Image: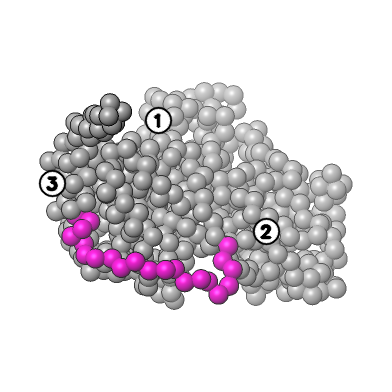
Amino acid sequence: MRKNILIAFLFLLSQIGFANSTLTENQKLAATCKIWGFLKYYHPNVASGKFDWDKQLFEILPKVEEAKTDTEFSNVIETWVTSLGEIKAYKAAIPTEKINYFDKNLNLSWIQKTKFFSKSLSAKLKFIENNKIQGKQFYIDYGDENHPAPIQFTNEVQYTKFDAKDKNLRLLALFRYWNYVEYFFPYKYQMDQNWDLTLSEFLPRSINPDSELDFYLSLKEFSAKLNDTHASFGANKMFEKFGDKFIPFDVKFIDNKAIVTGFKNDSLSKINDIKVGDVITKLQGKSIEELIKENQKYIEGSNYSAILNNIYWAIFNGNTNTAEIEFVREDKTAVKTINRYIYKDLKINYEDKKDKYKWLENNIGYVDLGILNEEDVQAMMEQFKNAKAIIFDIRNYPRDTNFAIAEYLNPEPKEFVKSLDADLNSPGRFIWRNKENPCGKINPDYYKGNVILLVNEKSISHSEFTAMTLQAAPKATVIGNQTAGADGANYRFQIIKGMVGSFTCYGVFYPNKKEVQRIGIVPDIEVNQTILGIQQGKDEILDRAVLFANTSK
């Protein structure tokens, strides 16, 4: 009898404790974001488009705000879920062929493990998971001829104007963006920070930003948390922070300094006597090291090499027509004012007059894959068929020549890649492709010399995919430094009017399922460009490739 009384007392105490547990606004909105996104892609009546899902969010937010305790919050959400209509239980069909799933990104355990969800709410959400939509999704689809990316976000309400003063619209933008990544970014599992923690970290700046600009900057930082060089967030409002005027020359960051490597516009650079090899140590009185630390949080990149390659605009752009720099030339430090220009006034000449391919010393062929076209491949390989080595420069963005070249480099077809696609039947889960196109063909007369691939931080996406393709050649050697680490298609999408985002939308791995994302193409021989090399006009990566071609060392 005493035992039963004690059990009843403890049960009652636990219920009272649950009822008196106060929730913060951040806790409630983080949970609402996750539930809203889960229902959007899993609930049969929601995922099929029967509701104006944005409107549903706007209607539930005041009720969530009014809820003070975990019990009240669970009751609000459970009532909402019930109002969405009946769901029929079903038995999943047994696949006719084996499907190889990739589940590192799929984790719906929060449905049952969130401490402030009532048992009945968790049960309802679990039932939806087990009886999810069967059939075409309304808000997500596979790509088509008009949308070449593997996925596309569909049927989102397009607002005529985004008012950043409207808290509901700010939350909608964040909720959409977070759930796009949650369910359809294949490399979520590789992020430095848990994606749930990122939501909790940035929610306060959507709930109550310091300013309108702060809200936009928070989404820029949010995008950088993906650790994906393909990721981006853009909005015109950010010009207030970074400016819309550009310097007319190119820089590379080495040892916390910015070294001039070339010109976007030669004549504009000459106006301020800018020379290749100038080492810029300060801008507007701040050291380059300090500016890198200040702005790194805004820069998307899979690795630090990619971040440094992408950070130039955040440091050198501005709202003023001029800027003061401190620089070193021939061991002398000086200060001067340089001009900045709106982008159209840079008048960049993109026409490249370099050779597509040419002979180097000692019977070595060199190919610039940034300007070589597919129709050039046959003539190029014919010219180099007896070369001691062929150097393929992939420190650029190739023009879909990889498969054509590979037919000359391999004696037979060879697997070189393994890919992942989003499983729209279970958002958050991905599927390994059953079939991949191999590179190469049956070719007993294939090229048997050394195949040397040059890569660096500018090698991204199709550049990395090209390197993987050519890396399959029997005598391939990769020389250079860490690549951008963002392989796979880049999907660019509108989050809400005036805000554009992007990320890598399908996974690319080696055949043994080794990652390329974030790691990049790992050089067999690592070579980094140096300040002295730039000043002396040397291409240190190419020089090392020539040495290897001559010595095999």
Q: Is residue 158 above or below residue 61?
A: below
Q: Nearer the viewer, mark 2 or mark 1?
A: 2
Q: Which residues are magenta?
A: 80-100
Residue at x 72% of width, y 57% of height: 471
Residue 50's x, y, as percent?
A: 23, 69
Amino acid type at circle 2 is Pro
- Marks 2/1: CA–CA distance: 39 Å
Could you tell whether 484 is left or right of 359 in the image?
Answer: left
> Contact, CB < 8 Å: mark 3 with mark 1?
no
Question: Disc 1 on helix, strand or loop?
Answer: helix
Marked residue nearer the N-terminal end (2 or 1): 1
Q: Nearer the viewer, mark 3 or mark 1?
A: 3
Residue toward you, 172 or 253: 172
- Marks 3/2: CA–CA distance: 50 Å
* Disc 1 packing (10 Å; few <14; some 14–19; many ≥20): few
Question: Disc 3 on helix, strand or loop?
Answer: helix
The quadrant of the rendering that contains the C terminus is: top right
Residue toward you, 373 or 302: 302
Marked residue nearer the N-terminal end (3 or 2): 3
Residue at x 30% of width, y 68% of height: 88
Amino acid type at circle 3 is Pro
Question: Is 135 inside the magenta-drawn segment?
Answer: no
Task: State the mark number for residue 511.
Answer: 2
The quadrant of the rendering that contains the N terminus is: top left
Question: Is 86 inside the magenta-drawn segment?
Answer: yes
Query: Image quarter for residue 282?
Result: top left
Q: Is residue 471 above or below residue 282?
A: below
Query: Which residue is label 3 attached to?
Result: 62
Query: Which residue is label 1 attached to?
Result: 294
